Image: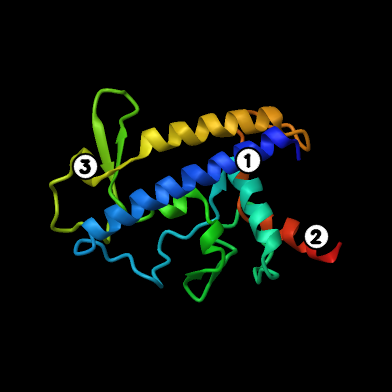
Amino acid sequence: MKAEAERKIAQYRELRNEIDNLSEKLGKLHEDEMSCKKGCSECCMNFNILPIEYYSMLEELRMENPIQAQEQDDDAEDCAFLKNDLCSIYAARPVICRTHGLPLLFMSESGENWELSCCPLNFTDFDEFHEQNTYPQDLYNSKLFLLNKEFIHHFEEKEFGEFDLLPMSRLVKELQEHSIA
């Protein structure tokens, strides 16, 4: 991989750490309202992710012990890395998985109103949301999108469009091929 693409992956991991810190802070702030705990896998799906996330995860997972995951179709609904309701790739998981359960604040499609999204199992008796107690989804998605745009510009192994997404399930096949080689 080209050095500049590697630098973008390093910047992605810094962004991921920033997101983790905010997610941890918000998780502690809202711990009484959240039912999300270790073993809850309601939101664990075969998400489509940006190439920068995909190749960062692939790189990290190749350095670990062999991953025990079942190969599945790209259109499968369940996450291939979910084992006994626990994430087997927790440290390398993508951004979307790092913010599950938190109150997410984002701009409506019309661009006129702020909207809030959270797991229907959480915040059943809580309604005082504001900028300081929600995750600013648009801000971090914009940062992620721009990093990905720079990454794919410097990534020579494959060509991607700036809106291309890859299913996480493909990681299983690539990891299996790597372990055989």
Front residue of this view, candidates 174 and 12: 12
What's the residue at 58%, 34% (across, down)? 148
Assign a secondary structure to mark 3: helix
Circle 2: is it few (<14), some (14-19), or many (20+) Cα within 10 Å?
few
Q: Amino acid at mark 1?
A: Pro
Kindly identify which numbered label has been placed on residue 51: 1
What's the residue at 74%, 56% (across, down)? 174
Q: Residue furthest right?
A: 181
Front residue of this view, candidates 9 and 178: 9
Assign a secondary structure to mark 1: helix
Q: Amino acid at mark 3?
A: Gln
Q: Amino acid at mark 2?
A: Glu
Kindly identify which numbered label has been placed on residue 177: 2
Quarter of the image with the N terminus is top right
The color scheme shown is: rainbow
Kindly identify which numbered label has been placed on residue 132: 3
Q: Disc 1 or disc 3, which is closer to the eye? A: 3
Circle 1: is it few (<14), some (14-19), or many (20+) Cα within 10 Å?
many
Above or below for 144 versus 49: above
- Residue 147 visible in image: yes
